[in-house]
Amino acid sequence: MIQKCRECGKEYDVDEIIYNCECGGLLEIKYDLGKIKSEVSKEKLRERRSGVWRYLEYLPVKDTNKIVSLWEGGTPLYKCDNLAKKLGLKELYVKNEGANPTGSFKDRGMTVGVTRANELGAPVVGCASTGNTSASLAAYSARSGKKCIVLLPGGKVALGKLAQAMFYGAKVVQINGNFDQALVMIKNLALENKLYLLNSVNPFRLEGQKTIGFEICDQLDFEAPSAVILPVGNAGNISAIWKGFKEFKETELIDSLPMMIGIQAEGAQPIVKAYKAQKDNITPEESPETIATAIRIGNPVNAVKALEAINQSNGLAEFVTDEEITAAQKLLAQTEGIFVEPASASSIAGLIKLLDMGAVDKDGKIVCITTGNGLKDPDAAIKASILPSEIECDMEVLRKVIEE
Ligand SMILES: Cc1ncc(COP(=O)(O)O)c(C=O)c1O
Ligand SMILES: N[C@@H](CCOP(=O)(O)O)C(=O)O
């Protein structure tokens, strides 16, 4: 197991704390997949409890006694027949990552990332965040007795996420700036050795997130879906999940790969623009804006990897409007009983848009990933709801109201 630069191929020992190669390229964890193939089998994996650590052989951990876990992963893959019928689809699934311990997919990354911090003996961890990364890191650092510092874009973090980061005991600092600026600042602190950085520039964290791909295949009886649709912000998740699918295929646990479809919000779509212009890197957006605050990101650090995942998989990238996001959020809640935060609903909004454009095969096996729980952002949900009627304690009035 080594850290390897995706750009120049330079290799680094796994114990070296480094976030970018000296050439500036992003790092990836590489394994001896031949060895893993000889060690794992579908049956062996199935004997273990579901969750991130079911896939231990594929994870960069040396000392299992150092694992920091809140039982993350093992999230439901709902077959959504009501929604499928409405949209004219044969087979639609929602992989609901909102069911993780802190309510988002970030927990999969943090169990591995904070375990790495534990192995390295790092006493302080930190991140910049639009909300979920901070909520998750705060929880895992509490569990492992580490100090946690989070940098947030002031006034742009959903209430539930802010409450989580504060309540788990992190030192929360809000900047008068956006997420992209916060990430530059916290990375500077990491380079000054003030903390161990656990944003998605950290390749160990992303290894945990690739288990979403493993788990989808596992839940589909070791078959890959035809398409996976997910929201894209800093773009670590789509890259990680694609890596997961490829590793499962290389170790012969699946025999095909899905199209990776990334969805961004209209006001924060650097990857969509680059994809449509057939470029392999983005032009950063200076003032990203969307109701889906989790993906309000203009300069995604993993953009190159995400574009590669999309292109390698014959996938695509599309944007959706805030109105389409809110409509999809409601539709999913009211047809399937699944309450997700706005960013997550962009996967459903994207699916609807792509179906209208004829860009998705209606007969395929489609998986939409919903990345965060609806309770994270109560303001957005309440704004989009019909408010309760208020009445006196009078049965006559009540009867009238319920008939309206
Ligand atoms: C709920 C939610 N969905 C999607 C994303 C986007 O994930 P990524 O940054 O890995 O692209 C994030 C965070 O970025 C998020 O918090
Ligand atoms: N949506 C993210 C943004 C940060 O992304 P990361 O994957 O680099 O941590 C968040 O929840 O903060």
Image: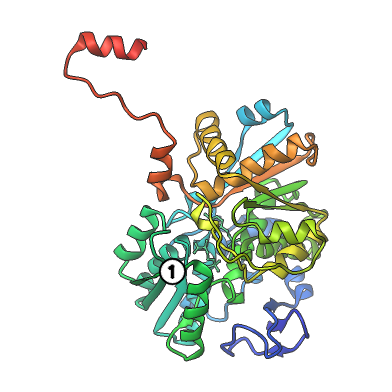
Work out whether residue 76 can be spotted.
Answer: no
Point out residue 58 in the picture as x, y percentages from the top left corner: 66, 70
Residue 271: quadrant of the picture: bottom right
Give the quarter of the figure containing the C terminus.
Answer: top left
Q: Nearer the viewer, residue 88 or 122?
A: 88
Give the quarter of the figure containing the N terminus.
Answer: bottom right
Residue labelled with disc 1: 137
Q: What residue is shown at x 47% (from left), y 66% (from top)?
A: 129
Residue 317 to residue 173: above or below: above
| Amino acid under disc 1 | Leu
Q: What residue is shown at x 70% (from left), y 82% (from top)?
A: 25
Work out whether residue 47 can be spotted.
Answer: yes
Residue 267 vs residue 293: left or right? right
Point out residue 273 in the picture as x, y percentages from the top left corner: 72, 58
Q: What residue is shown at x 29% (from left), y 23% (from top)?
A: 389
Q: How is the image coloured?
A: rainbow
Residue 125 vs residue 62: left or right? left
